[in-house]
Image (spheres, helix red, strand yellow):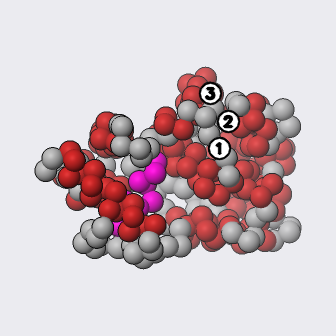
Amino acid sequence: MTHETFLQNVKQLVHMHQSGLLGGEVMPEDALIGIVPDEDLPNVLTLAMSLNYQRNAYTLWQSVAHAYQDEGTRWIFRPLAAVTCKREELRNVLIHHRVALQPNRHPEIWQRVAQGIVDSSPDGSVARMLQSCNYDVASLIDLMQVRHKSSFPYLSGPKIFHYWLYVLESYAGIAWKSRELITIAPDTHILQASVQLGLCSEKVLQGSTSDRQAVASAWETALKGSGLAPIDVHTPLWLWSRAGFPPLYS
């Protein structure tokens, strides 16, 4: 397959997504629409994304929506409150709404990420943390993946970090500087779709960290000069894989 043919297939896939031909138009994070107001979305999306690891994303975000709707537990999405509460109190809420599945590890991660936000923000909010970085992806990479990586467990990992940036753009309306630095988020569906399109060999389906990094790098190289950023093809690829790879139509 020539590179020109490959790009044509990718653009057909993007067109299919835009035309609603891939099914599954409802994405996991859509569970927050109409429930979480715009001003709270950065906090909610960030804290919950830190637990979006090796679990059903649809179930996670439905649980997050329920926890937010409960006025008695909504405080968990305020970083300052999550940092200052007792771990047991936080655990009880997260487990009750099934936002957390691991009773020790997940509350610990939630509280550590909340502390990282508080330490990196003038007022302890994600919105001000992003503002302090001038909405620059390069600055956030330096903050969360280099200087204070340990303060953002899971969230600083390459898969979740880049998908988090994409979700903030899509749902919270963040306009990123250095947007080209947002790489594709190589979860299982992305790995499978990358193989199906002929971009990568089946070896990457083993899903190791190096496999995922290889897929992300392959997409960066393949899309240079195409007018598409790697993150632009994430959702079309994800839905295409989830739909069982229906034929590509222009």
Determine the image quadrant of residue 111: top right
Residue drawn at x 22%, y 59% as measured from the top left: 196
Q: Counting other residues with Cα less than 10 Å from the Cα at mark 2, is it few (<14), some (14-19), or many (20 or more)?
A: some
Q: In the displayed structure, does residue 47 sit left or right of residue 167?
A: right
Which residue does the numbered mark 1 point to in the structure image? 175
| Residue 139 numbered tag | 3
Which residue does the numbered mark 2 point to in the structure image? 135
Q: Position of residue 65 (x, y in %)?
A: 70, 69
- Residue range highlighted in magenta: 230-242
Amino acid of disc 1? Ala
In contact (CB < 8 Å): disc 3 and disc 2: no
Q: Position of residue 123 (x, y in %)?
A: 86, 37
Query: Mark 1 or 3, which is nearer the eye?
Result: 1
Is 4 or 170 nearer to us in this picture? Answer: 4
Q: In the displayed structure, does residue 43 sit left or right of residue 202?
A: right
Amino acid of disc 3? Ser
The answer to whether one can see residue 142 in this image is yes
Mark closest to the chain's N terminus, 1 or 2: 2
Amino acid of disc 2? Tyr
Q: CA distance from mark 3 to mark 2?
A: 8 Å
Residue drawn at x 50%, y 54% as measured from the top left: 53
Q: CA distance from mark 1 to mark 3?
A: 14 Å
Label tally: 3
The answer to whether one can see residue 213 in this image is no
